[in-house]
Image (cartoon, rainbow, N blue to C red):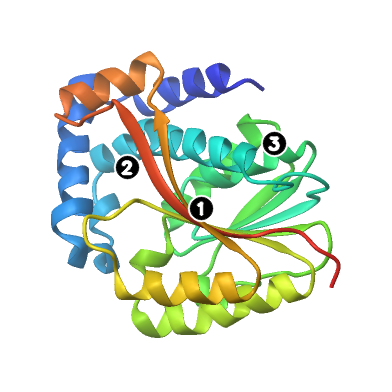
Amino acid sequence: MSLDTWLTALDERHLADLTPSEVARALRALSSCYVERRGKLERGGPLDSAGKRAAFALFYAPVHFIITREIVRALPHAAEGLEHLVDLGCGTGSAGAAWALEGGGTRITGFDRNPWAVAEATWTYRTLGIIGRAAKQDIGKATSRGGVGAGVLAAYAVNELQDEARAVLLPRLIAAHAQGARVLVIEPIARRQARWWTTWQEAFITAGGCVDEWRFRADLPDRQLSLARAAGLDPRELLARSLFLGPHSP
């Protein structure tokens, strides 16, 4: 299924009971929660209302899809020979779906602690024609599979973890790569670099990986562009940073 068809299905799914203006107001609140009130993330603040859930699905999910797709296309051999992808903190499944589609026929298993996100991710996979499923599980307890042909993704998820969970996750990702998996971490470009990012980028570089910052022209679809403008967001560029460990034979 094409991206346009998925976006149309998102409209039908999330605008059945809400107007675009209501979603735009919720998007404004959701954006504020991410940028100004990160303490609410652990308490589920971003998804605590129907409006915010719709705003996340209609705006952030497509944006994450587009950013991940462009990063995967730019990284060497990121999608080549990818057979199975584990998406840690999958959210609505859009970032993992983007990488899986670039791999062509890639199976996907998503994990997230939020029941609504799990259901939404399963719907995303099905709607985009991807073989996969999502399950309710904390990132720290989810399986990070290694092996040639495997991939592990953590997109827009690591920064939301507590320090203890991040400390457990990092060596597991490095170990998955040592077993042959490619590993990709994606996060927003922050005004003030978090301490954990410096530690992680050093670990990825030591393991033979790369660290990148990305700026893509924001050719957003009409719905996402109109929501961004109505919510007072700047849609001119899509920004992200990434850590990547490429495929290899263990």
Query: Quadrant of the rendered structure where residue 109 is?
Result: bottom right
Q: Amino acid at mark 3?
A: Glu
Residue assigned mark 2: 53
The residue positioned 59% from the left and 47% from the top of the image is 96
Circle 3 sits in a helix, a strand or a loop, which is it?
Answer: helix
> 215 or 21, which lies in front?
215
Residue assigned mark 3: 102
Label 1 vs 2, first from the N-terminus: 2
Q: Amino acid at mark 2?
A: Arg
* Mark 1 vs mark 2, CA separation in Å: 12 Å
> 64 or 184, which lies in front?
184
From the image, which quarter does the C terminus lie in?
Answer: bottom right
Nearer mark to the viewer, of 2 and 3:
3
Query: Quadrant of the rendered structure where residue 162 is?
Result: bottom left
Circle 2 sits in a helix, a strand or a loop, which is it?
Answer: helix
> 147 or 88, which lies in front?
147
Expressed as whole percent of the image width and height from the top left, the position of residue 145 reads 72, 69
Residue assigned mark 1: 118
The residue positioned 21% from the left and 62% from the top of the image is 38
Q: Is residue 100 above or below residue 116?
A: above
The residue positioned 35% from the left and 51% from the top of the image is 188
